[in-house]
Amino acid sequence: MGMSVTISAAAEQDAEHILKLQYLCYQSEAELYGDYGIEPLTQSLDDLRAEIAQGHALVARLGDEVIASVRAKLDEGGTARIAKLIVHPRLQHHGLGGRLLDAIEQHFAGDAAAKRFQLFTGHRSEGNLRLYRSRGYAPVGSEQVGPRLTLVTLEKEASAGAYATSA
């Protein structure tokens, strides 16, 4: 590629780029479950801006292009709820999702209130499940949210120390 990927905090001006990337990335999930009405595909720009303002968001850039993102918010019970880990389809399977997951965990690991990390994915999303398990997440529950979709919730303790850097 010739350029390095950099990871940094998302800024308000990144919101539109993140939303477009989110729409692109969730097409395969919508196809997998036969549901194009999933929230990542219907989220508004205003809702995304509010989500970024209320929590913490990271972006990965290749040059000036936003190629990946993740968001999280620490709740009052000490759970850092990680959401919408996305990587541009042309750059998947190169370790970028793992790097972003490590980076968002590191951000919250510095907060004494953070006791655990939690995220969810669809039951058929094998690549996502594989990534999360490789980073120390274990299933803690599931919820059927539609006729074809069961969300699997995975969690790990914040003190798990699984902040390995990846390629």
Image (cartoon, helix red, strand yellow):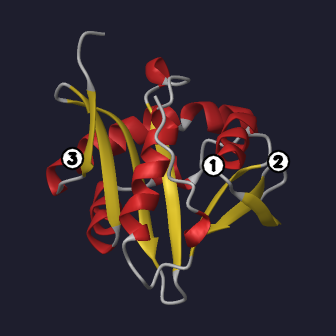
- Which circle's residue, 3 or 1, is located before the other in the chain? 3
Identify residue for label 1: 135
Task: Answer few, some or many: residues within 10 Å of disc 1's Cα (few below 14, many 20 plus, some between 14 and 19).
Answer: some
Identify residue for label 2: 148
Label 2 secondary element = loop
Q: From the top left corner, tell me how far across and down residue 114 is, in percent.
A: 48, 78
Q: From the top left corner, tell me how far across and down residue 38 is, in percent.
A: 59, 51
Q: Amino acid at mark 3?
A: Asp
Q: From the top left corner, tell me how far across and down residue 42 is, in percent.
A: 47, 51
Q: From the top left corner, tell me how far across and down residue 51 is, in percent.
A: 35, 66
Residue depicted at x 24% and y 47% = 8
Residue 64 falls in image quadrant:
top left
Q: Nearer the viewer, mark 3 or mark 1?
A: 1
Q: Nearer the viewer, mark 2 or mark 3?
A: 3
Label 1 secondary element = loop
- 16 is higher (above) or lower (below) than 137: above
Q: Amino acid at mark 2?
A: Arg
Identify residue for label 3: 14
